[in-house]
Image (cartoon, rainbow, N blue to C red):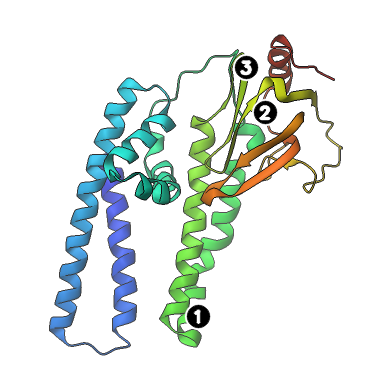
Amino acid sequence: MARAKATFFLCLATLVSLICFSGLRTQQPVFHEYLIVAAVLLAALLFDYRMLNGFLQRCEAARAETPALHDAVSAALAATLKWPLLARLLKTEWLTLYYACFARFNRSDPVEKETHFSYEKAGNARDVYLFVALSQLPFLPFIHVFLEGKKGPGVAWLVTLATLWSVVWYLAQVQAVRFRPLQLSNGQLRYRFGLIWKADIPLENVRLARQIDVCENLDPGKLFLSPLGSRKSVSLEFNAPVTFTGPYLLKKRRCKAAIAVDEPSRFLDQLARRGVRIA
């Protein structure tokens, strides 16, 4: 974990320094202006480092009381930022950085075969991440230099930061699908897909569940689809529309859903035991 923190701040300091240098060199600043910028950046990084240490310590303490990693991290985030509105506004970004950089050092959550259902293989999150990283990162320096020469440093860094964030975001999903399985209780299905979409679905609202044929055509306009190119394996039909909540308060209301589960037969069997009709 200590090495991960050092690597994280080294990358952050390098990135911020490059952005500042790129912007300053077009303004022809004097030496003392460079010193002022360096001092401000150092103070900001030290503050961030202190905040991160406190957050990770709270995560460890919360994990001792809460077996689920995501619940522990969310509680630690609220305690670190203190203001509920601030925690809500920054939750997506903070969790993305945590899962991308630090989640892999945690032990796996306890799993119950009757209630927890993985979608790591069906979700294809790792394959999507590798595709995004390999298709963008090798060419990013050349694109940045080209854009900086043609459009200036502002546009170049905007494109670079957006590209880097997309890679970090997909890496976070790889870890999140491991720690956030679907959970089934006697009366509710807690649908989760990484850090992207979630819904708490009452089982009494599930009219029908069935396994999806490999060649079946799924219309994304009529039903909710598990994201990230996942192999949809189970279809759910609802009596009343279900609201799926995504990042940045995005919402989708659907009467049907096609979700990804690694073991669809076991999942359907557990649904049937809880009174859901299986086709």
What residue is disc 2 on? Answer: 261
Q: Is residue 236 visible?
A: no
Q: Position of residue 201 (x, y in %)?
A: 64, 28
Instruction: Pick the residue in front: 147 or 91.
Output: 91
Q: Residue at x 54, y 49 (%)?
A: 249
Q: What residue type is disc 3 on? A: Gly
Cα distance between the residues tagged 2 and 3 = 19 Å
Check residue 88 in the rendering and tell me which mark sits there, or answer none.
none
Circles 1, 2 touching at the beta carbon (< 8 Å): no
- Identify the secondary structure beneath mark 1: helix
What residue is disc 3 on? Answer: 187
Q: Is residue 14 left or right of residue 186?
A: left
Check residue 147 in the rendering and tell me which mark sits there, or answer none.
1
Q: Nearer the viewer, mark 2 or mark 3?
A: 3
Q: Position of residue 18 (x, y in %)?
A: 32, 71
Q: Residue at x 77, y 47 (%)?
A: 220
